[in-house]
Amino acid sequence: MAGTAIEIRDVTKRFLTPKGEVFTAIRDVTFAVEPGRFCAVVGPTGCGKSTTLSLVSGLDRPSEGSVWVGGKEVDGITDGVGFMFQADALLPWKTVLQNVALGLIFRKVAKKEAVERARDWIRRVGLAGFEDRYPHQLSGGMRKRVAMAAAWITEPRVLLMDEPFGALDVQTKAIMSNELMQLWEGSRPSVLFITHDLEEAIALADRVVVMTSSPGAVKQVFDIDIPRPRGSVQEIRFGSRFLELHHEIWATLRDEVERAYARTAGV
Amino acid sequence: MHSTNDGSSNGMLSGLEQASQSAGRLGGAQKALHDRIASGQQSMDERTHQASVAFRRRKLKVWGARLAIAVIIIGGWQLFTAMGWVDKFFYAQPSGIWNRLWDYFQNGTEFGSYPDQIKTTMQEALYGFLIGTGVGIVMGVALGLNRFLAEVLDPFIKVVNAIPRIVLGSIFIVAFGIGLTPKVLLAAVLVFFIVFFNAFQGVREVDRNVLNNAKVLGASRWHVIRHVIMPSAMTWILASLHSAFGFAIVGAVVGEVLGAQQGLGLLIKSAQGNFDPYGVFANMFVIAALVLIVEFVIERVERRLMAWRPKVQSEAVLV
Ligand SMILES: Nc1ncnc2c1ncn2[C@@H]1O[C@H](COP(=O)(O)OP(=O)(O)OP(=O)(O)O)[C@@H](O)[C@H]1O
Ligand SMILES: [Mg+2]
């Protein structure tokens, strides 16, 4: 059940703004994630990272170019994809158990088996005992764990994560990153992981894609050659190779972040 | 509106009391330990106790004020009419209204026993309510899901909505006679529009992220409707049902006023014809009581179905 390849070829996405103007969110984006690899995408806010993920998942279509997953062109919702959204996306009227089991229920797995497997996943993400709570009765970190279990339970071959730990405190983020690594080493789906946090990107990924400020394009792609298993995310960031890479990528990223900031701040 | 929350929060408080009582029944061996932590625990108990006292005192105040207002209104009415400052020939008198109600229940009405009148009106209103709600939900959801259909039907709905709907009652009576059907239809039409617009809006307001999440998880069209759109629209639909039953009663009563052989509306019409404000007021209060009872039941159902929703701020603070 290893991951399948993701290929984004010359993709441009335009939106019609409410004023009726055409707005280019991303332009001529091309990059690939090899099967079973972990790819992080960093870039200034508003550069089209979420847009890119929605194109890979099939929730939206490119205006130009094409997206390929597992050798097939994306057309409609992509099969075998797990998605952790940037915003809260759990079904608020379903309990933790029901939310986690949802992917199986939709795939027509027998109810009993679905519930059993959901319980197992809830335990794995450390939420045993919270099965019957509703999302609003959980903390932000707990909701992210539920979202993680809900995405992993379908055993996706491609995992799309949109700043999954962005709103979490440093400690929770560290714990969840480690949990994510363990899960990923277990079944090795291909991962496309968006983050604002360059350290997180380098620590987790095999490859880091840096995007330009809006309209987003690929500025540069870095291969992260720190050997795996890398051990705890908190520790590797003091390694010399890590610091080198961080220095190098940050130099590239900083220009874009400053440019994006200058634009939105009207400086 | 939140007074109905008393039950649950009182339950919580009495639960705390029980906990502190059971702490008092500890065995000898544990007594020492208990004493050691008692100082800390006592202050906790004390604080929850104080909170509960303050809570009850506030409730008492609210109910006291309510009672005072009711007494002023009804007492003032009685007094003003008794003193002759207000003519009770037009405005009736609370004591007289009470007597009239008593009389209705004891001796029946010119159209049969009083419970029969109530039953007739309630039946019409309930049938109308159920039909209007059912059709409203189905149509609202269908149009909410189908942009094309919604656009096509939009002007028609606007026109029908602009018609003073009470007038439809006359048409229904001409078409269906003075039996049950025209009242049920009128009630259903009134209920339909409220529920329809809410169901429609509810479908449109579905959270994009939740919808996308379900799609990526592999939901079919039917799954999306059943697991995402309906529960989300339900919030809106249930909110509309609060006022919907009031409209169902209006439909039934107006239908009876326009033409009927039984029912509270007919009694009101007949009382009006006899220059009898007592009859009008007595039936009016009975209708109000019926609406309140049904609305109470609807609210119960709503709270059960909406258990997943975070408590409204004022509710959460009370506990
Ligand atoms: N449906 C839409 N209609 C119009 N513009 C859109 C739409 N969706 C996104 N955009 C615009 O496209 C650009 C990219 O948005 P996107 O959400 O992909 O950014 P992002 O890189 O994920 O940003 P962040 O890091 O802040 O999440 C933004 O300027 C946004 O305003
Ligand atoms: Mg984003």
Image (cartoon, helix red, strand yellow):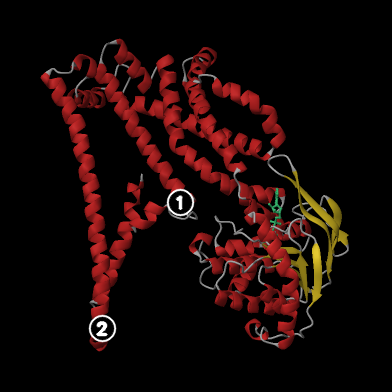
Q: Residue at x 40, y 26 (%)?
A: B121
Q: Is residue B213 left or right of residue A249?
A: left
Query: Quick one: SS at disc 2?
Result: helix
Q: Residue at x 76, y 75 (%)?
A: A188
Q: Which mark is residue B34?
A: 2
Q: Quadrant of residue A153?
A: bottom right
Q: Residues within 10 Å of mark 2 (few under 14, many from 20)?
A: some
User: Residue A10: x, y in percent?
Assistant: 87, 58
Report which residue position mark 1 lands on.
Answer: B304
> Share a chain, discs 2 and 1?
yes
Give the chain letter at badge 1.
Answer: B
Q: Residues within 10 Å of mark 1 (few under 14, many from 20)?
A: few
Query: Quick one: SS at disc 1?
Result: helix
Give the chain letter at badge 2.
Answer: B
Which residue of the protein is positioned furthest toward the front in this rendering?
A267
Q: Is residue B4 left or right of residue B174?
A: left
**Mark 2: which amino acid?**
His
**Looking at the figure, which quarter contains the N terminus of chain B?**
top left
Q: Residue at x 41, y 47 (%)?
A: B300
Label whose residue precedes the other's in the sequence (2 or 1) = 2
Q: Quadrant of residue B71?
A: top left
**Looking at the figure, which quarter contains the C terminus of chain B?**
bottom left
